Image (spheres, coloured by chain):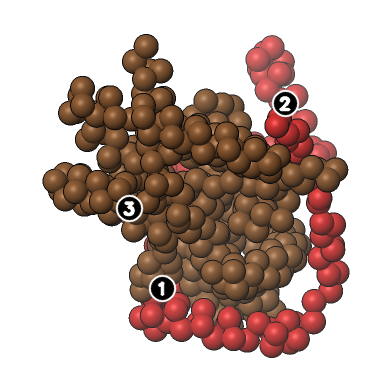
Chain colours: A brown, B red
Amino acid sequence: MGTEFETIEARITSMLPQLQSECGILQRMVYKNKNQHRRSSYFQRLLKVRRDLRLLQSANMEELVSSCLLVIKGDRPKQKLHLLGSLKRRKCDGDKHNFMERLLGAARLLAEMVEPILKAASEVSVLFAQSFFMGFSVTIMALLARLRVLVQQILLDVVSLFNMVSSLSISKQSIKITHNGIEVFRDFYPVSDDFVTLECVWKSDKFILLERKHKTNDESHVEDSGGNVSVQTSDVNYNSIESFLGDDQLFHERVEADVVAKEDPNHIDDMNTDLLTGSSQIDDKETRYSDQDTTKAFINESSQEAGLPASSRSSTNDKLQSCPKKVAFVSIKNLTLMRHKS
Amino acid sequence: MVTDGTKKPQVSVPTPPPPWKINLQKYAESHALELHSLQSIIENRVNSDYRSQKNKRRRKTVFDNQIARKGCRRKRQKLGIIDKALAKSGLEENHQKKLPRCVHRRYELKKNPENGFCTSGDVTKRLRTHVWHAKWFAMTKLWGYHLPLCLQGRGKGSRALLKKAQTRGACT
């Protein structure tokens, strides 16, 4: 994963200046030969290629690529937080597009640039066949060949960067910021919107860009538990500070009090036990795992648990009896639910 | 906990200006691999048929802007052909008079016999140089012959004078 994006970074940062130099040469060739060739069809094709390249230059690819790499690397946490936060303002701010939408537009443009290049090259090859204007046609063919290769390779790299950043923006993560010796943990929670993944398919002589929209139906559970997790983590931090200060007896007393408070709502309502057991398992597993791959397995497990409520009840009872530490989590949830009721 | 999200300043890499001269052979050789792959793709596209399409060919006589130039040679040739057709068909004089003056003069010039005088419509004799004189001089009929009046100029000034004189009734 890391080595993959490092190679992509090295490749795309070396290719963008090459693309700019080829653009410069093409514009100079068009400028010099416009008077002589301007009415011919192959020159009209060249003008279309130049128009697409100017559009790509105005899209400002280097800024987009650098912001994607900031999100993926995470070596500047403030910048990363700012960029991830800007993704949430996707639909609110209509006047200003965030960098993912601009990157998607650039990918679409790159996918559509290949066809005019191939048509222009086929027109210029007619000049080759007739051996007309050999110097001009040789230079233009070499230019178009290099442009085709550069455009398609940049498209592949942009698509893989887009997929990496979109997968990062979906997952929940905490970012550590150190400022003047003080460490601050900032949590990022994704918005439950539809997200887009890109895919390139090779079809006969060029890549075709496919866009797939994914809905976050499974993540509604994650979203529900997200709020609870935030409350829980803050409480955990608070308790850890007390343990750091050295008051261990108070911590144990609180645990015992919560255990006593737990028994009453269980007897009163049977519906609450189902909600509690389901959410408690989700919390336990979230605290254990932090990787992206395991989050996918977690979503699958949560869907399985919804299908089998009876086995989950028995398993939760066993776990609760065996481990006294998890009782604290469940009891805190009881307190929060009591507060919501009142 | 609130962090100041400052946007990254746009570091614009200065692009080197394009080269003033390109060594054609070196440039093509440095792009040889891409050229070969592009050539194979185009060969697959056009099925090895590199002829230019007929609907995209330029017209053969695009250099001959007939509308812009009125005194062009092709136009005269076309009119000459019409003139010959009219001569062969033997149309009436009313139709012949509608021909432009130069065409009419050419037609008259071809009617010169080898010896003697040719006669005009009203049985007056014409000199062999009648066509030329008719172009440059005002003509009159004296003693049964069509003769030029020896007035100066090509005829525009003198003809204008004659017209004005005739309208005022000076000759009669």
Rendered location of residue A153, percent (x, y)? 55, 69
Image position of A333 (left or right of A265): right
Residue bearing mark 2: B160
For the residue carrying disc 3, how many other residues have a C-alpha within 10 Å: few (<14), some (14-19), or many (20+)?
few
Q: Quadrant of residue A333?
A: top left
Question: Which quarter of the rendered picture does the C terminus of chain A lie within?
Answer: top left
B33 above or below A250? below
Q: Residue at x 59, y 46 (%)?
A: A174
What residue do we see at 58% from left, 53% from top?
A: A52
Give me the disc on residue A205.
Answer: 1
Give the foreground label among 2 and 3. Answer: 3
Question: Where's residue B96, x and y in %?
Answer: 43, 43
Is residue A263 shown above or below A199?
above
Q: Which residue is mark 3?
A: A322
Residue kind at label 3, given as amino acid type: Ser
- The quarter of the image holding the N terminus of chain A is bottom right
